[in-house]
Image (cartoon, rainbow, N blue to C red):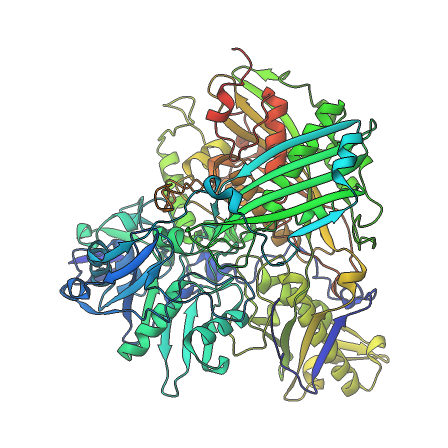
Amino acid sequence: MLGLEKLFGGDDTNALKMDEPHPESLLDTGAQDVIGKPLDRIDGPLKVAGRATYAAEYDLDNVAYGFLVGSTVGKGKVVDLHAEIAKAVPGVIDVITDYKTFLRNPGQGGETKSPTQGVESVDYWGEPVAIVVGESYEAARDGAYRLQQAIDFETKEGRYNLDAYRDEAKTPPPGVIPPDYKQGDVEKALAEAAVTLDATYDTPSQNSAAMELHASIASWDEDGRLTIHGAYQMPSSDRQQLADALGLSKDKVRIIARYVGGGFGSKLGIAPESVAAAVAAKTLGRPVKAVMARQQVFDATVRRSDTEQRVRLGADADGRITAIAHETLGSNLPGEGFFEPTGASTHFVYPGENRLITHRVVELDRLLSGSMRAPGEAVGMLATESAMDELADKIGMDPIELRRRNEPEQDPQKQVPFSTRQVVPALDKGAELFGWDKRKGVAEDRRGEWFHGLGVATAARSNVLQPSAAKVTIDGQGRAIVETDMTDIGTGTYTILAQITAEILGLPIEVVTVHLGDTDAPPGAGSGGSWGAGSSGSSVYLACEALRKQVADKMGVAAETMTMKDGRVIADNRSVPLAELVGDGMSATGEIKPGKQEKETTQASYGAHFVEVAVNAVTGEVRVVRMLGVFAGGRILNEKTARSQCIGGMVFGIGGALTEEIVHDPRNGRVANRDLAEYHVPANADVPQIEVHFLPERDVHANPIHAKGLGELGISGAGAAIANAIHNAVGVRVRSFPITLDKLLDGLPPV
Amino acid sequence: MHFTINGQHHEVEADIRTSLLDLAREHLGLTGSKKGCDHGQCGACTMLVNGRRINSCLTLAVMHQDDEIVTIEGLGQPDKLHPLQAAFVSHDGYQCGYCTPGQICSAVGMLDEAKKGWPSHVSADLTDAPLDDHEISERMSGNICRCAAYPNIVDAIAEVAGLSDEQRQPEREVAA
C-alpha cells in the first residue's frame, strides 16, 4: 500500500525482507541497557519551552498569507466567484483558484496518486474552491469571509442522509481487508445455535481533531522545486501525492515536517490547503502560508465514517461460538474507494466455523471519509465487544469466562498460527489488578446519587510492517546521527529511534541525534496504522547492525564477539574508544520490507480493557471513574512513551463511547458542530487517572526489534468496556454511540 | 502601542484586527503560543497577562497597552526549564507537544489562582478549596489535549504543587 517504488539502495544498504522469523535481536544482546527504559523524550525540552517548530512556524522571507474559501452549498457548481469583492479589501493581493488543480478532497494514507482534483463542481459543503492571499493574515481572512458570502453557486440536489439511500449501498473495492468474507453457513448455524444474539449498533461520523491545524508554507526555488513546510504523517507518500497533483516529478517536491501537532489519521494524506498554497506561491512568486481554520478542518479534511453494524452471534449452551456475522454499512463521497474496515478484527479475534463479514458503502455528498485512529477496530469493536457482553448476559455467564471459552488456537479463517496472542493472560491480569471479583449484579451498586458498574472488553489491533529506510552515521567524534523522513506525531519516534541506536552502538543516548520529517532523507514508513515503531525502528536497527560490522572490521574481530558500551568497543581483550575506530566517520542505510511472515502468521497486538463508571441515578450523567488497560504488543521500546500512547488511545475510547459525534445537517451535509466547543473531545475533567500494565512479550515474526504497534491498541475495545460498564451500572444497553444521557434517561432504575 | 513581553519592552504598530496570539506568532517571532481553534475553545494559546491566564486568541493586541505579558518562551528555556516545564518532561505530560505551552502557562496561572483561594466548579467549600486531583483536572479543563496526556499532566502539576498522595486523593463522593 505504501508504494515506495525505490528505496535508497546501494552497497552500504542492509536490507531485510521479513520472509523468516528473526529470533535473534541485537536489542537483547546490547550492553547499553537503554532499550525499554522509561526515558524522557529527547525532544521534550524543546516542546515544553515552545521551541519545537510546527508547520506554520517557519520564518520565511516575504511570506504572504493564504486563507481558503469553502463552498456554502452541499452540491452544485461555482457560477461566479466575484473575486473583485475580496480584492477590494486593503491588503489583499489576489484571489487564486485553479479549478482543475485544486484538491476536491484530501488524500488517503499511503496513496501515491493525487487525491481527486477539481473544484468548479462542488461535491460537499465547505469544499475549498479558492484561496485569498494577503499581505497579512487579517487581510486574507477578511477577504475570504467576504468572498465566501458573495460567490454565486448553482445548487444541485444532493444525497446527505445514509438512511435514505441505504438500499443503494455499493460493495467497495478491496481495501486493507476484502469487503466480503464468507465461511460455512451462518444462517444454518444460527438456526441451530442454543443461544443467539442479533443486535444492530450505530456509530456517528467522527473527527480526528488533532490540536495542530492543517497548515502548509509553500515556496518554490529558481529550479522549480517546491518545498512545503507542512503537517504530515507520511511525508514520503505525501510528497508523491503533491507531485502528482501539481504535475511534477517527485524529486521536485520536498516536505519538511519535523514536529507534527497530532495526526490520528487526519494528516496521512495531503489536505486541500497544500495544493492551494503551492499554486498561489507559484502565481505570486513568493512563499504562501495557508493555515486551515478549525472549522475548515472539520469541513474539508477527513472524517471517520458513520457506521451501522448488525452483529449476530450463535453459541452452544456452554458459550462456545459457532457463528459470527458482522454486516456493516458506511458512507463516503461518490467515486472514493475507501471504506471503513469495520470488520477488521472480527476476522481473527473469536472462533466460530461459520462466518460472515461484509462492508457496504452508501455514496453521500458529505466530506471524505478515511482513516482515523484504528480505522476498523475503533468502531467495529464498539459493536462486537458490546455484543460479546450481551451474549454473556443471555447465557448468564461472566463476560471474561465467555471470552476465555472462545480463545482460538489459531487464526479461525486463515488457519495459520498467531505470532503471539495474550488475550486470556491480559484478561486474567486485568481482573486481578482491577478487582473484577468485586463486580456486582446489574444496578446493584448504588452509592448515594450514583450507580457504579464495571465493564470489560478485549483489545485487538492488527500489526503491520511497512517498507521503511533510515541512514545512521557515526561521526568522527563517535556520535551517532539518525536520518529518515519518518515523523514523530507525538508517538515518541525521536526517542525510541535514539534508544535503538544507543543500545546497538553502545552509546549514551545524549550523543545520539535524530533528524526526522524531511524527504531529503531516506523514506520512512510514516506514522499511521501503528506501524511506525516496528517499521522505522527496524530500519534503524538494520543500519546499526551494518555499522557494527563496519566497526568490527576496523577492530579486526567478528561482530558477534564484540561488545559496544558507553562509546567504547570491547573485544579480543581490548577496549577502544569508538571514535578512534571510525576515522572521519562511517554510515550505513537500513531498509526493512514486509515478507512472507505476514501471511504465515496472523500478527496483532492484544489486551484487555477494564472500566468502572458511575451513572447518575437522576440525570443519567456518566463519569468514568477508573480505567485499566493490560496490553501485549511485543517488546516495549520505551515504557514511558508506550504508556502515554496507550492512555491516549483509551481516552479516544472515552470520546467514542460518550461524547464524540459529527452532526451532519440533513439539508446539505454540512458539519453542523464544526468546532471544539460543539464537537466534544474529552477534556481533563472527563478523564480519571488511568492505569496501563504491559505483559512481557517478543514477536520474532513481526520484525527484528520484536515490537508491535501500540498507538491504536488503546482505543480498540475501550469504548465497549465503557458501554458494558454502563449496562452493569444501570441495566441499560445503548447500541447507538455516543452514549449520551438522553439515551439512558428512560431506562434508568426507578428513583 | 507598547507593552512588555517576557520582560522585554516592545513598541509595535498593530492592525486593530490582530489578536494577541497572532501578534506574538506572526509579528514577534514568538511561536511557542499555539493556535488550535482561534475561538477560545482549546486553550493552546494560553498566555499570562498581568499574571492571569487568558486565551490570547480571544483578545486583540491593541487592548494590551502597557500590559505585562508572559508566554511560554518567558517561563524557561530548553536548557533552563521552569519547574512546571521540567515536570511535564519527566511525567510525559504531552505527546505531540502542540497544546503543551498552553497547558504549562495555564498551570502557572491556575496554581496562582489556587494559592489565592479561588474556588472552582468542583470545590465542596467555596472558602476552603485545597488542590487535589479533581480540582486540578477541573481547573485545567480549558486546555484540550487530543493526545490525552491528562493523567500525566495532573501528575506533573501535583508534583510542582507539592501535593502528597493523600492530598491528591482525599475522600470524596466518587463521581464528583
Looking at the picture, does residue A550 appear above or below residue A675?
below
Answer with left or right where residue B59 lies relative to residue B156.
left
Seen from this angle, which residue lies furthest front?
A: A167
User: How far across and how far down the image is residue A550, in percent?
Assistant: 74, 84
Q: Residue at x 41, y 51 (%)?
A: A365
Asked whether the viewer can see residue B7, the reply is no
Could you say which is closer to the camera, residue A472 or residue A450? A450
Looking at the picture, does residue A61 appear above or below residue B1?
below
Question: Residue A628's quadrant in the figure?
Answer: top right
Looking at the picture, does residue B149 appear above or below residue A469?
above
Looking at the picture, does residue A220 appear above or below residue B142?
below
Could you say which is closer to the camera, residue A342 or residue A268? A342
Answer with left or right where residue A94 lies relative to residue A208.
left
Question: Residue B129's quadrant in the figure?
Answer: top left
Position of the N terminus of chain A by quadrant: bottom right
Question: Residue B122's quadrant in the figure?
Answer: top left
Asked whether the viewer can see residue B146, the reply is yes
User: How far across and how far down the image is residue A267, in percent?
Assistant: 48, 60
User: How far across and how far down the image is residue B63, in percent?
Assistant: 18, 50
User: How far across and how far down the image is residue A346, in percent?
Assistant: 70, 45
Answer with left or right where residue A63 lies relative to residue A657.
left
Could you say which is closer to the camera, residue A400 or residue A408? A408
Q: How many numbered discs, if any? A: 0
